[in-house]
Image (spheres, rainbow, N blue to C red):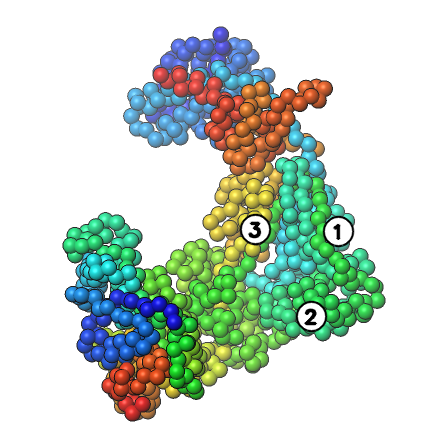
């Protein structure tokens, strides 16, 4: 006969107001197997917990039911209490008589009756509970950071400075991300390169950071603590160990008219190039789609010029494997494609982006005002190099537009547009900036003051309204829009137009997320474990996220989130063994028919195809097997298993049927 | 030579009234291309602007009756050369496709079931005949003629209804004009509104809108404007002298229906195409 103790909590007034806790205790004490039943005003308090501990010992309890709030609230608390009294923590169950009873009912009699039923269920379950032991998983105490923008850099430096090795994988030839190309940053107008490039150098020189640039994650195996990740190092055609970064190769390259990715097409680069002078590593790469040697075995001038003999036209992609215990995804963002998709015009055709040379997007404008940009920071418009005297900035291009664009707010555009108007005014004193906006969203420390400065000190003209059409006439862009505050149509003759286009997750992030079993939303932004309480965790154990890969955000937020992700990684790496909750799937290999429906159904790829062998190694049968590191205990395998060999520890079918039976 | 194309034809009120010249041009041009039009028997007005300003159900029921007639008369493809008509027909189809209860109610109102007839605007009708067929039939290429292709507002809008080309920067008319040997000019106002029916209620607004279109075409060195809508033609052609008087300027801009240009390239005479009935450039 079981010896179960039931502890009914008042939760102050929360439960006791609606549920007659005395009657509950009287009734549940009569249930078979219940040794004692008591109620208490605050069971989670110190005296409440002490009472449970004493009863476990004095009444020799072999099972405990706490009838109180949701297990999300206090299951861990009470299981620790049980463990302290020598009871296996998995022999404690909770009956939720607050959220699922007292808070949602008014009638005291009915609520009391329901509370009794809920406790009856929990008692039936606890009778069928087994003692479980937490799962121990060994940990490879190093981390991978995917993405070398400001978020990835921060996360990598934090982890490495704490004493652990970091493998950083960056898709582009240099780390630095979008921030490396920005001019000055809001709300302090400090130079983006000045604050970022030292951090890039720190990454490049850090003894505990192993840097893979021009590389991508090819495949992921393993699970939390034990990832084995295959990295594809794309052929660079330059031996980075021999190269000194002198730059002679770029000087002799005759193919100089290629649109620079770093300048977002505002400047040109040779076929062999370093993305920008402060690149880390400061090593060039050959664009194989352009290079005459690689395409038709011509030219080869760079090879002849290179004194170090670093050019290698025979280079190929290489696959490398790295073992890590945790992964941070910091893959960043790209700008929404305005007006053009797959070469076809779509979306905001009325703005003429791609048709008029002087209609540019916000990152292109950043390059135009950046001291490291193609015009050395002088504002010259792309069509004829003249200094524009009137510039129109249009915010929310693609953002907050259910009809044509994306429904969400890209969050940073109001701020950088205000910044753009200031930078423009600081460089072109006689110039006039005009901004068309829907709302000004400038929440943040010093942010609203910054926008006011743009308007009041630097004289940017703000019109609340949208632009309906941009046309070109006599070398000027005729911008027609509405000022909805005055109710008047507005026409501005501008020399340049800057479109604040929406932020989208970087290309390829969804494929990467699938490799790591990380969720993403309908727009491709990576999903956090919980929007408030687990903002940098994902639902895949050991994988963390930060920066604009998770949602549109600015530099301060990205950096803060990166440090948060790093701290979570450090928790994972802090011990040589990980403890995981044992409430995961288990497959009875004796009865498994090896149909592998569970293998196909498992959303976490936690089922392995395995063989049962005798101790001497003689093959007995095929079976499915659960990888305890990967399983998240969702129960999908249990639902699809036709032979009933899959079950969830702590939520077995036997326990569930016992609960149902107790109600009938 | 490709197969003869048989298309249903929904003229709408304009082509049987003020824009009879459009119908004349259309019939002559498509006839020369080996396509025949069979006019829908017993068709009624599409409702145009008036119906949907008054009553949504009426604005769907009117086109729905025409679609029902098309289904009854075995017409799979129906050319509606007026942009307003083709848009209204497509709009009714879309409204009924998205709302089954509405479709049923409309079915009761018009006492018939509208079918899945494909509605074609003028450009789609040319596309149906085929660009290769048109190119092969060109006898007198329109060399050195600079044309401003004017779509107006309804040919490409609302985009989710008409599902035709890019609504802001369309190119399909330019392709046809280029196939005739003419040179389409790049200009700004190809999808702006001409004022349409406002010509009766607020002439001032129409004169201003039409002026901007004419002025921009002239500024980009167009010798003529091609249109694919009877209302556009009225405002740009018939009202051109009023625009000139109001703004004390002179454009002398010939306004062709697109089928006029195709017809001319096929070797038809201006008279056969009804071009002599236009207001501007009668001598052409």
Chain letter belonging to callout 1: A
The residue carrying pointer 1 sits among few (fewer than 14), some (14 to 19) or many (20 or more) residues within 10 Å by Cα, namely some
**What SS does tag 2 mark?**
loop
Q: Which residue is mark 3?
A: A509
Q: Residue at x 37, y 22 (%)?
A: A115
B271 left or right, relative to A575: left
Could you say where residue A363 lies in the image, as x and y percent from the top left? Answer: 56, 65
Q: Which residue is mark 1?
A: A206
Between discs 1 and 2, the one toward the N terminus: 1
What's the CA distance linking mark 1 and mark 3?
27 Å
B220 left or right, relative to A304: left
Q: Which residue is mark 2?
A: A270
Chain letter belonging to callout 3: A
Closer to the observer: label 1 or label 2? Answer: 2
Quarter of the image where the C terminus of chain A is located: top left
Dot 3 and dot 2 within a common chain? yes
């Amino acid at each position: 006969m079981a010896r179960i103790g039931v502890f009914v909590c008042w939760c102050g007034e929360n439960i006791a107001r609606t549920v007659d806790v005395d009657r509950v205790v009287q009734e549940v004490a009569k249930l078979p197997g219940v040794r004692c039943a008591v109620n208490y005003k605050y069971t989670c308090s110190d005296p409440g917990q002490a009472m449970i501990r004493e009863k476990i010992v004095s009444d020799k309890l072999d099972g405990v039911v706490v009838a109180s709030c949701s297990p999300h609230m206090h299951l861990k608390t009470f299981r620790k209490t049980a463990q302290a009294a020598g009871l296996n923590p998995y022999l404690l169950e909770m009956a939720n008589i607050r959220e699922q009873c007292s808070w949602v009912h008014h009638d005291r009699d009915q609520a009391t009756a329901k509370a009794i039923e809920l406790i009856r269920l929990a008692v039936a379950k606890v009778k069928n509970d087994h003692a479980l032991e937490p799962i121990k998983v060994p940990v490879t105490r190093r981390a991978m950071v995917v993405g070398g923008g400001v978020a990835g850099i921060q996360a990598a430096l934090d982890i490495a400075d704490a004493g652990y090795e970091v493998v950083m994988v960056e898709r582009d030839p240099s780390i630095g991300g979008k921030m490396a190309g920005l001019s000055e940053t809001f709300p302090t107008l400090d130079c983006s390169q000045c604050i970022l490039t030292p951090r890039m150098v720190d990454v490049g020189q850090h003894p505990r950071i192993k840097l893979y640039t021009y590389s991508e994650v090819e495949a992921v195996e393993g699970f939390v603590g034990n990832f084995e990740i295959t990295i594809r190092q794309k052929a660079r055609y330059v031996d980075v160990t021999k190269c000194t970064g002198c730059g002679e190769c770029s000087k002799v390259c005759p193919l100089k008219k290629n649109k620079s990715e770093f300048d977002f097409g505002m400047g040109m680069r040779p076929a062999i190039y370093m993305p920008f002078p402060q690149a880390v590593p400061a090593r060039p790469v050959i664009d194989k789609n352009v290079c005459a040697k690689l395409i038709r075995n011509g030219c080869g001038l760079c090879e002849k010029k290179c004194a170090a003999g670093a050019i290698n036209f025979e280079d190929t992609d290489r696959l490398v494997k790295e073992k890590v215990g945790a992964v941070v995804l910091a893959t960043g963002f790209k700008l929404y494609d305005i007006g053009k998709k797959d070469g076809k015009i779509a979306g905001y055709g009325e703005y003429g982006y791609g048709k008029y040379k002087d209609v540019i997007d916000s990152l292109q404008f950043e390059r135009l005002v950046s001291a490291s940009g193609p015009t050395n920071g002088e504002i010259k418009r792309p069509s004829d190099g003249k200094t524009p005297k009137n510039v129109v900035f249009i915010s929310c291009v693609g953002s907050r537009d259910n009809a044509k664009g994306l429904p969400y707010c890209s969050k940073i555009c109001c701020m950088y547009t205000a910044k753009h108007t200031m930078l423009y005014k600081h460089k072109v004193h006689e110039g006039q900036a005009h901004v068309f906006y829907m709302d000004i969203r400038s929440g943040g420390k010093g942010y609203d003051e910054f926008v006011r400065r743009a308007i009041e000190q630097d004289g940017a003209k703000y019109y609340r309204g949208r632009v309906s059409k941009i046309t070109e006439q006599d070398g000027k862009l005729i911008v027609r829009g509405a000022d909805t505050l005055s109710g008047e149509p507005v026409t501005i003759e501008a020399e340049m137009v800057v479109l604040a286009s929406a932020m989208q997750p970087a290309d390829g992030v969804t494929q990467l997320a699938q490799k790591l079993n990380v969720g993403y939303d309908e727009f491709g932004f990576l999903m956090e474990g919980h929007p408030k309480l687990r903002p940098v965790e994902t639902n895949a154990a050991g994988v963390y996220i930060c920066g604009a890969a998770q949602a549109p955000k600015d530099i301060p937020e990205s950096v803060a989130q990166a440090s948060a992700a790093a701290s979570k990684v450090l928790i994972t790496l802090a011990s040589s063994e990980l403890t995981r909750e044992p409430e995961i799937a288990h497959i009875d290999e004796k009865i498994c028919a090896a149909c592998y429906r569970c293998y196909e159904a498992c959303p976490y790829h936690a089922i392995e195809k395995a063989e049962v062998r005798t101790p001497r190694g003689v093959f007995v049968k095929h079976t499915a097997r659960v990888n305890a590191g990967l399983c998240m205990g969702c129960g999908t395998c249990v639902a699809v298993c036709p032979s009933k060999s899959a079950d969830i520890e702590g939520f077995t079918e036997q326990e569930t049927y016992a609960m149902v039976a107790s109600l009938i | 030579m490709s197969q003869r194309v048989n298309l249903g034809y929904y003229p709408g009120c304009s082509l049987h009234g003020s824009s009879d010249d459009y119908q004349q041009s259309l019939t002559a041009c498509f006839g020369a291309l080996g396509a025949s039009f069979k006019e829908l028997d017993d068709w009624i007005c599409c409702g145009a602007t008036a119906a949907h300003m008054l009553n949504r159900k009426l604005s769907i029921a009117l086109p729905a009756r025409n679609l029902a007639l098309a289904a009854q008369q075995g017409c799979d493809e129906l050319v509606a050369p007026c942009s307003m008509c083709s848009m209204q027909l497509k709009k009714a189809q879309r409204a009924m496709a998205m709302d089954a209860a509405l479709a049923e109610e409309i079915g009761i109102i018009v006492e018939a079931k509208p079918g899945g007839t494909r509605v074609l605007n003028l450009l789609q009708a040319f596309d149906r005949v085929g660009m290769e067929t048109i190119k092969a039939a060109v006898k007198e290429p329109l060399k050195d003629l600079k044309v401003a292709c004017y779509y107006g507002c309804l040919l490409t809008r609302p985009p989710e209804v008409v599902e035709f080309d890019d609504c802001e920067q369309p190119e399909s008319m330019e392709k046809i004009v280029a196939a005739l040997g003419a040179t389409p000019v790049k200009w700004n106002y190809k999808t702006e509104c001409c004022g349409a029916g406002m010509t009766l209620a607020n002439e001032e607004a129409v004169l201003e809108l039409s002026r901007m279109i004419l002025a921009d075409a002239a500024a980009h060195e167009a010798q003529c404007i091609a249109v694919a809508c009877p209302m556009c033609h009225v405002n740009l052609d018939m009202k051109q002298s009023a625009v000139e008087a109001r703004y004390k300027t002179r454009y002398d801009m010939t306004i062709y229906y697109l089928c006029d240009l195709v017809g001319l390239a096929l070797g038809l005479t201006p008279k056969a195409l009804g071009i002599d009935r236009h207001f501007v450039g009668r001598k052409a």
